[in-house]
Image: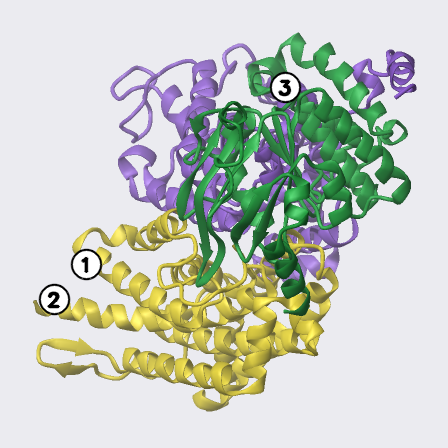
Chain colours: A purple, B yellow, C green
Amino acid sequence: MWGWLAFGSSLVTLALIYSLLAMGLDVQYGLAGLLDFGLVAFFAVGAFTSAIVTLPPLGSSGYEGNYTIGFGLPFPVGVVAAGVMGGLLALLVGATAVRLRGDYLAIATFALATIVQITLSNETWLTRGQFGISVIPQPLRTLVPSSNGYLHAYLVMTAVITGAGWAVARRLAKSPFGRALRAVREDEIATRSLGKQTSALKLKAFVIGGIYAGVAGSLWVHSIGGVHVNQFVAIITFQVWLAVLLGGAGNATGVVLGSFVLVALREGTRFLDLVPGASNLGRVNPTFLPSLRFVVIGMLLVVVVRVAPDGILPERRGRRADAGAGSRESVAAATEAPS
Amino acid sequence: MSQFLQTIVFGLATGSLIGVAALGLTLSYGVTGFINFAYGELLTVSAFSTWLGVTSGLPLVVAAAVAVLVVAGVALLLDHAFYQPLRGRGAMPLLITSIGLSFVLQNVLRMGFGADPRPFPVPLVRPWTIGSVFVPPVQAVVFATAVIAMAVLHVLLRRTMLGRRMRATAENDALARLSGVRTTATLRVTWVVSGLLAGLAGLMLGATETNVTATMGFVFLPVVFAAVILGGIGQPYGAMAGAMVVGIGMELGATYLSPDYTLAFAFAALVAALLFRPHGIFRGGATRGT
Amino acid sequence: MSLAGHDLPAQQQSDAVMVVDGITKRFGGVVAIDNATFTVQRGAITGLIGPNGAGKTTMFDVMTGQQAPDRGRIELDGRDVTSWQADRRARAGLVRTFQIPRPFLGLTVWENLLVAGTDATDEGIVTALSPRGRHPAQGIVDRADDVLALLTLEHLADDMASTLSGGQRKLLELGRAMMRQPDVVLLDEPTAGVAPRLRESLVDRLRGLHEQGLTLVVVEHDLPFVMDLADRLVVMHLGAVLIEGDPDTVRSDQRVLDAYLGGLHG
């Protein structure tokens, strides 16, 4: 019973981390229409940043691995540094790339994510390459000694951070900033002809996405306690895409919902083991079930785009009445009537 | 000097491999207007089919020919079942669909064959020596195949009605339809030709890497993107030239800078091309897009 | 050879709000605009006319900064704006509509107007997260209300722009331009596709805007309509400016007749 609760707790934590990624992509794609096919790069940079910032330095009392770099700083510094580094990478990439037409941006970000991964696996002094970094400090660990209790505590902390991210994303979407981004998404030339600096707007959206993904990387690395370059493959990016499209692009609540559905589906396929035939196949070919999971995710992308392009919760519209408009309507109409 | 010549020889072979793959991708991009992210898997399917054919007793040449045809069939099937129904809804849904299909194909292959690499059935031949430069026969064959593929495609595009229809559809879909081109049929043929080239490229990739894995095409795909973008989307000659630049650049980078970053050089070239020459460095006549 | 500068009194000439000076624009081998020169007088309605392919829309693109000319310069309010991007010219008070309207289809009519009316300073991230970002400024809301009433689009305020008819989209684009409180508006075929009933009132609105001091440049195919509306006409033919002057002068010019007849037969 307690084991199941702990399992559930770690799944919800994972879903919340995916929610942060999805909200980041949603600002980029859902609002600004930017096809970011390299989101995983910001996630990876956030993860490694947070790990390195919090690792105890070489020779210190807490030091117990083979890594050589560590700053021994507390976890909150790690989260903030992860967000900053994710945002900085997005700024670096986006400063030039956001000018590219839609599908060119998709290719450029896809290629850049691969460059980041190649760099991370080659710069072993920083990332320990194929060995990975383990025993990454876990925050609050000393406060909550029981390991199940710790999972729940971590869940609560993740929920608080993701909740704050959700509130910010919602505000952004409803604000004049979000509305301008949506205009850029609909028609960049028309938006520019109304005096907007569309490249700057797109760059801001891109950087916000990078920050969200960086923070997500930090939360993820500390929940697992280890990090390895091979974890940051392209399929992570496209799982987040699935969460966004499934939940409803442009709607922060929707993409959180989409992330929970994604994690439920993905982890649900673990239980295929219980099907007699499947477990036999799994014995013959150990990659069978993990592969099946990605087949399901790939198929869902195809199906969602085809049958439900607006997702579960479509984008919210700004209504006239919400703006407190219309109160002067009669006056306006009256002054116009004689002309 | 001989090290430099050797690097160029390898670069030409790598460029040839990339070039054949880029021809198929740029052709489908030019005519259909979206980047087929499932293109890498077409290469993988070709290599797997060849391996399967040879392990079930077929001679290599027969297995290879069957594999190329299988890939053309798969390309046609994907178009019919997934891409055709989305026509007229813009590039984004097609893009996402092709990514979904890429993961489906990749992982269906992994479900069937596991994650272990399989040997690509290529005969081992001693390399020829010209002066102090080694030329492995496999690479010579890869280079020759690329030249032939380019020549055949040139004749197809420039000298046949079909080629004219394909170019008309690429220039302006609606206008082509108005002038009586059956664009749906033209698109189908385009997918078949694109598939045949992907099949060929899959054989070349298998022979070069000497083994077959489910992710080989997907990993190779960004390099092909680099060549296509460098050459200007929808430009077969540009794609071939772009492929040579990428291929030779990768080999030079690996020899003189750092072998760890071979792929990164290709992508850096891609990103640089996107930023400074988004219409391709070899752009000739007018193509789709602005 | 332009007639401008010879026939105009000096005082009026100095009150040019826009100057198009020797503009040439080529696409590949095709010359879309060929050394075109004319002025837009402040507060006037200038009609830009000419047969199909005369280069009128390309001229709008060059005037607004959407396309860079190969040669020549554009002046706005006495400043050389040739190197300015479209957004900067728009912020300087120059707005346009498009031949085929480009409303933001995925936004409501109301949101279309608010986007246009909001300045960049209110579109920052800090504003978005501060209480100020919750509601649009009252001034903008009032203006949007007025524009809706003026264009009789009130009943469609919360509808998606994608559901509007072609004529309604034209009106929405005009409304979006008005939200910018511009000095100069370039209108590309403002009445094309607008229902005859609305057309009348649209002309009234344009005259009304003119009376408020707005400068209008109108590309229009309907000659009687534009002859009636405009104070001044610029006639383009095959990329060149044929003649510039008041409607009566233009009406009686043989070259204009030839151009239109030639356009019809060619």
* Tag 1 residue: B255
Q: Quadrant of residue A321?
A: top right
Q: Residue at x 64, y 63 (%)?
A: C263
Q: What is the C-alpha distance between the residues marked 1 and 2?
A: 9 Å
Q: Is residue B158 left or right of residue A181?
A: left
Task: Give residue A168's mark.
Answer: 3
> Compared to A259, does A9 lie above or below?
above
**Which of B10 and C153 lies nearest the eye of the viewer?**
C153
Q: Amino acid at mark 3?
A: Val
Q: Quadrant of residue B121?
A: bottom left
Q: Quadrant of the C terminus of chain C?
A: bottom right
Q: Badge 2 is on which residue? A: B3
- In depth, the one of C136 and B146 nearer the eye is C136
Q: Chain of mark 2?
A: B
Describe the element under mark 1 as helix, strand or loop: helix
> Which amino acid does the dot numbered 2 rest on?
Gln
